[in-house]
Amino acid sequence: MPESGIPDDGEESADSPATGRSAARTGPADEGRPPGRAAARKARAKGGRGRKKPKPRWKRVLMWSSGSLALVVLAVGGGAFLYVEYLNSRIERAPLDLGNSDIEAPEANAAGQRPLNILLLGSDSRDGEENQRLGGRADLAGEPVRADVQILLHASADRSNATLISIPRDTQVPIPECTDPESGEVYSAQESASINTAMYYGGPGCVVATWKELTGVYIDHFMMVEFAGVVDMADAIGGVPVCVDANMEDPKTHLRLEEGENILEGEDAIQWLRTRYAFADGSDVGRTKAQQMYLSNMVEELQGNMSVGDAGQLMDLAEAAVDALTVDDALGSVTSLYDLGNDLGSIPNDRINMITLPNLPDPANPDVTLIPDPEPAEELFALVRDDRPIDGEDAPEGEAEETEEPADEEPFDPALVQVAVQNGTGADGQLPVDGRASEITDALRAAGFAGAETDSSAVVAESESTVYYGDVADQAAAEAIAEALGLPGSAVRNSTSHDGLTLVVGADWREGAAFPQEAAGDEGGEGGAGEPSGGGSAIDPEDIHSGEDDDCMAINPENTW
């Protein structure tokens, strides 16, 4: 057990069931058994034929939830309604948020579109004889289930791009107060704990509450996949292909694979999902990537093996699928899952980008646990809150003009712009700075905005300085106000709760007539704070992986043979 006291998935006793396991298939399919898509794909690769570029990982997981269930409905024909109701009854549901957050859902953009945030969880229960047979540690039986895989999926309002943020399971974060939905027990907030333990405090709803507190991002849904059920589905289709860049043998799970593509079933599949030390540098980052590879490749195999003509196989797979899923109440039906898959299916593959939350060794236990790296982590969260892509790419030329700017917009006179300036500096536990709204009002008037007025009628407190506009016709004026004061482009936001134009001077701007450039995160250009490729960004572009990346898993040189 690690020094943190948190059991490691890969740590097994010497007498763990590591023998009698069917070896991973690295050659042709077993004699007398249909080869399946995995073996056929490998044969094509050996023959030098090009391989179709797959959908990005996790997009495939979400698409499977809708596509497989839709084919089932077609296959069962007239009995579809009753069968869908039967599937609905088997979907496990849980409350979305067990905390007390007051974070509100983001407002729609000018085109009426809203971003979508989904927390994707992977759990690895050790209860039950089947999990023990698959190599689970008997000493963990009866322990609370942890969510060792956690990924926040952000789909932009216009569905032009998506960002996926994964977090190593041993990252230390604050866990808020959570209330168990079944017992009513209230779990006290914790200043710092491993994020995978948030499940202990009432279930996935406390993990959602933890992410909301960590990021300041509103979360619409969660989807949790249980690993044992995933393996059951994979076995039904003859295994799942994975790829390693060298011969490997993990010292804890005893998984032994040859370089290249391997087809995993049964115990080998669950050991792949639990392996840590043989991947990359032996950290949770490598294990997370391996789990994503397995899950996404499994979905590709499922999609290729399904056919409307084989209703029996489809029904078996659909039942295994719903048995492996736990979702929030609003997502707990076949129809909702189907609609979600269709909604996300339009996101271009090359605009789906994944990044691991930037982290640092935990000063309290640097060899075991991690903490978020404050500057790049907050920059990343701000991009998600502002619905801005981490790849720095804009919408296709002309598209933004159609959705964000009125046609035939007339030039405006800054002297005629009416803008209310409010003092919101008393946020983040700080006292408000007296006179800040008046100071910035004077700066605006000096810049030509004669209609600027100090508004002291409302008490506000905001962390970030923001220019709000209530009507799309005022967007250009809002952007001009931001530019005049040196505010980043991300500070301009549409808000139906604000009439006209309102500038809130936040806690990030407590002095000076011009917005501090170190807070803007760039050199004052239109790109604004959080631009991954701009000057001053704390996010390393090398850490951003495109949705089309499909490399083999890198193997730790210490664990090869």
Image (cartoon, rainbow, N blue to C red):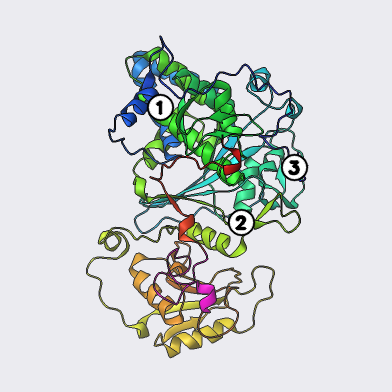
Distance CA(mark 2)–CA(mark 1): 34 Å
Amino acid found under the numbered disc labelled 3: Pro
> Considering the image in quadrants, where does the N terminus appear?
top right
Q: Which mark is residue 359?
A: 2
- Mark 3 highlights which residue? 2
Distance CA(mark 3)–CA(mark 1): 36 Å
Q: Which mark is residue 431?
A: none
Q: Which mark is residue 301?
A: 1
Q: Is residue 492 above or below residue 289?
A: below
Frontmost of labels 3 and 1 is 3
> Considering the image in quadrants, where does the C terminus appear?
top right
Horizontal arrangement in the rendering, residue 281 relative to residue 321 (left or right) = right
For the question of whether residue 382 can be seen, the reply is yes
Q: Position of residue 552 (x, y in %)?
A: 45, 40
Q: Which span of residues is magenta-colored? A: 516-538
Distance CA(mark 2)–CA(mark 3): 19 Å
Predominant SS along the magenta part: loop
Horizontal arrangement in the rendering, residue 515 relative to residue 159 (left or right) = right
Residue drawn 69% across the image and 24% down it: 127
Q: Mark 1 falls on what kind of element?
A: helix
Horizontal arrangement in the rendering, residue 45 relative to residue 122 (left or right) = left
